[in-house]
Amino acid sequence: MSFQEKYPRPYYSKYEQVELDCHSDWFRVYRLPGKVFAITEPKHCQEVNSFLIIGSQRALLWDTGEGFFDITEVARELYPGEIIAANSHSHFDHIGCNHRFDHVLAYDDPQAHYTAERGAPHGLFADQLSPEMFIGGYPEGLDPETFFVPPYRIRSVRDGQLIDLGERILEVIHTPGHSPDSMMLLDRTNGSLFTGDMFYQAALYAHFDCPEFGRSDLNAYLNSMERIQSRIQEVKALYCSHNELIAAPFKIKEAADAFRSILNGKVMEGLTVDLRHVYLEDGTAIVEYPFREFSIVSRASPASGGLDYE
Ligand SMILES: [Zn+2]
């Protein structure tokens, strides 16, 4: 599959890799500007990035990875002091080691509570655990027949809440759209914006509608992007939870424009709907709209703001 052919991704060479003593076969760590480590899992198709954000008093782990291996051991190798954890949202690929913390900060939304009570059961992973989803086959130590994410405890945070890491203040910004419990963290001290799954330079998913993933909402997605856009002068860089680690702040405007064009029933000039990606999921057409350096996947029904193909 395509992600296998492109391994390792060329963009990693832009960043300084940090050698690890533990789990170095699975995780790759990069030192990023602004006292941040990216802890990546490039050998699984999700290409998830978690971030360890270092303050003078404590560090915050932004998402806890897929859970195939213990990310907390990597985090402790990188930072010997107190480490707290927060979730960008509660999708399975970001909560894998939540249960290893006493509690994890999560947005105060029913979706976050739903997943905390259940974890991510084995059945949810479906083809995510098939061998072709892994570079070089299954990593030693992972049992794909039984893997699951256990339940965990959360502590709710609200919009505007500040998290003090010591000489580093992170602001919670509720950004529903991808999921109802999606949030971003704005590092007011360094101008870093941690975008979770709301923005990265690959397919942005706005099509979910099930208890485990919650309901995506195109209007909410656009509102969230416009809200971030209104504060973009505070932002120096976007730290993204999948694929390329860092993106430029102006990409938020591009994403807002893209969502607006979909909701208005027309894609941006010069771009066309890629009908090859249309498929059916529970009887609903799913379509992928291509834009520059990212795409948007959504339901194609009129209710979700999709295009009319008839
Ligand atoms: Zn997600």
Image: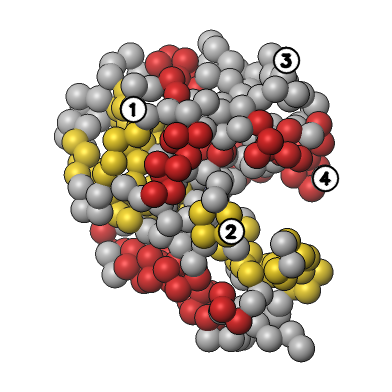
Q: Is residue 8 visible?
A: no
Q: Is mark 1 within 8 Å of ligand 1?
A: no
Between marks 4 and 2 in the image, the one whose residue lies nearer the viewer? 2
Asked if residue 270 is positioned above or below residue 157 in the image, the reply reads below
Identify the residue at horizontal 26%, vertical 58% (top origin).
Answer: 234
Label 1 near label 4: C-beta < 8 Å?
A: no
CB at disc 2 and ligand 1 closer than 8 Å: yes
Q: Earlier in the sequence, mark 2 or mark 3?
A: 3
Q: Alpha-carbon neighbours of circle 2 within 10 Å: few (<14), some, or many (≥20)?
A: some
Q: Of helix, strand and loop, which one carries label 2?
A: loop
- Residue bearing the label numbered 1: 103
Q: Which mark is residue 301?
A: none
- Residue at position x 38%, y 22% from top? 101
The residues tagged by marks 1 and 3 sit, at their Cα atoms, a distance apart of: 29 Å
Mark 2 or 3: the one toward you: 2
Q: Amino acid at mark 3?
A: Glu
Circles 4 and 2, Cβ within 8 Å, touching? The answer is no
According to the picture, the residue beneath numbered tag 3 turns out to be: 140
Which type of secondary structure does the marked residue at label 1 adopt?
A: loop
